[in-house]
Amino acid sequence: MDDLQLLIDLHKPANRQGPGGEVELEMALNVAQIDRSSPIKIADIGCGTGASTLLLARLLNAEITAVDFLQDFLDQLEAKGESLGLSEKITPLCCSMDNLPFADEAYDLIWSEGAIYNIGFASGVTDWRRFLKVGGVLAVSEITWLTESRPAELQAYWQGEYREIDTASAKMAVLEQNGYAPIGYFVLPEQCWLENYYRPMQHNFDAFLHRHKNSKAAEEIVAAERREIALYEKYKAYYSYGFYIARTVA
């Protein structure tokens, strides 16, 4: 089994494949001033197993295209949607976020939690803009420095993982340079990382290693996740996910 399949197997049982939370999703909707009763078309890009997709479907009068490049995750989303009676609102789409088959100005809202890093923040906000109607809303969470300087160990780690990590002011400038008017920003709190993401993952480590007979590849994946968790616990004052909400301008 290759590393991608191992990562899928580790993360598929989880409710979330990255930091986030229901309270924070509703906060982003409120900042965006989304009318919860009016019909709306949403693309949830990098939806994973659908924690955000399902909550958006429950809260809004929405038609949602749920995009992920992993069919295993979409299968989980479909099963959950059916059990909750929400499947009629959700259309799963298995494709890469850098090759979306959407028509121009097809959506009122593009949502992406903890996923835009796969193609880079600048590429994502630039490429996805044409899919939004004029005045449409982009709501994305993105790894963000909370301070102007930070410890060398942390800087080196994230520069190796994701070179576009930057401060909120830099991210806002990218939005402004690419046809958006920023309308809100907030930082995901600690529980979005620990209680909602890392702790459930840690709880699954032993079962994951057992399923894969403590193979070297499986142990290396767990070791990498443990290192990331330890860095967050040590340096959480310096970084988090920032939630960015912006509106397209003509």
Image (spheres, helix red, strand yellow):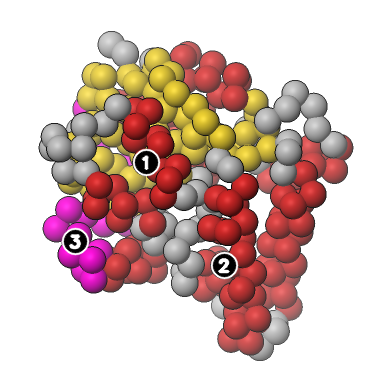
Determine if the magenta segment contains residue 40: no
Q: Residue at x 59, y 75 (%)?
A: 204
Q: Which mark is drawn over residue 26?
A: 1
Give the crowd class for mark 1: few <14, some 14-19, many >=20 residues within 10 Å.
some
| Above-or-below relation of 139 to 75 | above
Q: Position of residue 130 (x, y in %)?
A: 30, 26
- Mark 3 sits on what residue? 87
Secondary structure found at label 2: helix
Compute the Cα span from label 1 to label 2.
22 Å
- Amino acid type of the residue tagged 1 in the rendering: Glu
Question: Considering depth in this image, is 78 or 220 the residue closer to the camera?
Answer: 78
Q: Horizontally, is 239 left or right of 72 in the view?
A: right
Please identify the residue farthest to the right as the structure is shown.
152
What's the residue at 16%, 43% (across, down)? 61
Q: Which element is circle 3 on?
A: helix
Mark before the other along the chain sequence, 3 or 1: 1
Task: Answer yes or no: is residue 127 visible.
Answer: no
Mark 3 residue type: Ser
Q: Quadrant of residue 23?
A: top left
Looking at the image, do the residues carrying marks 3 and 1 touch, with CB atoms under 8 Å apart?
A: no
Q: Is residue 80 above or below residue 155?
A: below
User: Which of labels 1 and 2 is toward the front?
Assistant: 1
- Find the distance from the CA under tag 3 to the CA under tag 1: 21 Å
Percent from the top left, x then y, of residue 222? 69, 69
Q: Residues within 10 Å of mark 2 (few under 14, many from 20)?
A: some
Q: Earlier in the sequence, mark 1 or mark 2?
A: 1
Q: Is residue 93 above or below residue 246?
A: below
Q: How far apart are labels 2 and 3 at the CA level?
A: 26 Å
Q: Disc count in the image?
A: 3
Helix, strand or loop at label 1? It is: helix
Q: Find the magenta span and give its range.
A: 81-105
Location of mark 2 (residue): 200
